Amino acid sequence: MTSPIIIAITGAAGHIAYSLIPRIASGALFGPTQRVALRLIEIEAGMKPLQGVVMELHDSAFHLVESIEITSDPHVGFQGAHWAFLLGSLPRKAGMERKDLLSINGKIFVDQGRAIARHAASDIRVLVLGNPANTNCLIAMKNAPDVPMDRWYAMSRLDEDRARSLLAHRVHSHSRNVTKMAIWGNHSSTLYPDFEHACIDGKPVEEVINDRTWLENDFMTQVQQRGAAIIAARGLSSALSAANAAIETVRSIIEVTAENQWHSVSLCSDGSYGIDPGLISSFPTRSDGKHLSIVPEIPLSAFAKQKIKTTIEELREEKAMVTHLLPQ
Ligand code: NAX
């Protein structure tokens, strides 16, 4: 057995963490033999429920869990961490727009970015879920200038998986048969689910679903609004599916991407496709198991370019609202 991977999770007493932690502990992320050391980070108000989570983790006697530490101090929590999952923030409630969250949540990510830069392992990689995830990731990244920009990710895989599932349902196929379903831009209601390059059973979506009107309207709207639909039904935002998407995001980064496949990850733009360098935007990506790259030279239609322009404009607006949190 190799030495344990140290995993820091903020918002560890929250709903997503409750689904995420047992899956990490049981090997769904790093495999059935890789030991993990868990650093669970909460605010003071979350420490009591977090103690309950820890009791349950002990009661589960996970054989891969080497140690569990809890703390409300990010400087302790990120110590030596190889992976950080940043979940901790105020979740979006019914009627609340992502932009309302910016001012509340942005400051959390300044402190966490600084703590990661000071204390994490030299190979730290960070996945941000806490909304607005792309801009929070940008804030944390900018406050950790010593951590290379290619180590910062925000989650858009849940949007990809929602889109794959919707397409599969429409033609009575299975989501595992839906490939190359890219999400572009922001994890928000402006995201662009690129059905023009996705395939079902290896055939272009538009060949299988001969209904462009549905794809441009109902399909896109359902993907964009799925988070709100879950909140309306559950009274809480997505947790089980978000935890699953977090696992799948990391696996898509550390494992070699299958032939004829790509996955959606929000990462720091290098200017590809005209998207402002430095913005954290979702792109179709592929991994060689070590490096994650933006899939190059995808021909984009005028329709796609327009949709991407809209979502990138939102990312620019969000960035403009938090410039005071972004050291130059
Ligand atoms: P919960 O409210 O259940 O849990 C959040 C936890 O974070 C709470 O226990 C809170 O005490 C803790 N927290 C707050 N500030 C903290 C800080 N500074 N340090 C450490 N912990 C802190 O929310 P949950 O349902 O778990 O969602 C977590 C975040 O994920 C939310 O921002 C939510 O909007 C976001 N989501 C992101 C998704 C994505 O695809 N990127 C999808 C699901 C989800 O909506």
Image: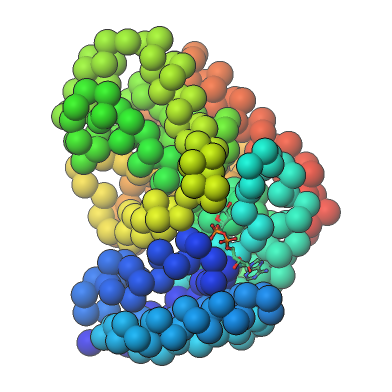
Residue 2: which quarter of the image? bottom left
The answer to whether residue 85 is left or right of residue 323 is left
**Of the pair 113 and 147, the residue shown nearer to us:** 113
Q: How many marks?
A: 0
The answer to whether residue 315 is left or right of residue 299 is right
Residue 198 percent across, percent down from the top left: 30, 28
Residue 55: which quarter of the image? bottom left
Residue 212 percent across, percent down from the top left: 36, 11
The residue at the point 49 percent across, 13 percent down is 302
The residue at the point 30 percent across, 28 percent down is 167
The answer to whether residue 122 is left or right of residue 32 is right
Residue 218: which quarter of the image? top left
Q: Is residue 118 visible?
A: no
Q: Residue furthest right?
A: 324
The answer to whether residue 76 is above or below residue 183 is: below
Query: In which quadrant of this rendering is ligand 1 seen?
Result: bottom right
**Of the pair 269 and 55, the residue shown nearer to us:** 55
Q: Is residue 234 visible?
A: yes
The answer to whether residue 327 is left or right of residue 87 is right
Quarter of the image where the C terminus is located = bottom right
The residue at the point 50 percent across, 62 percent down is 15
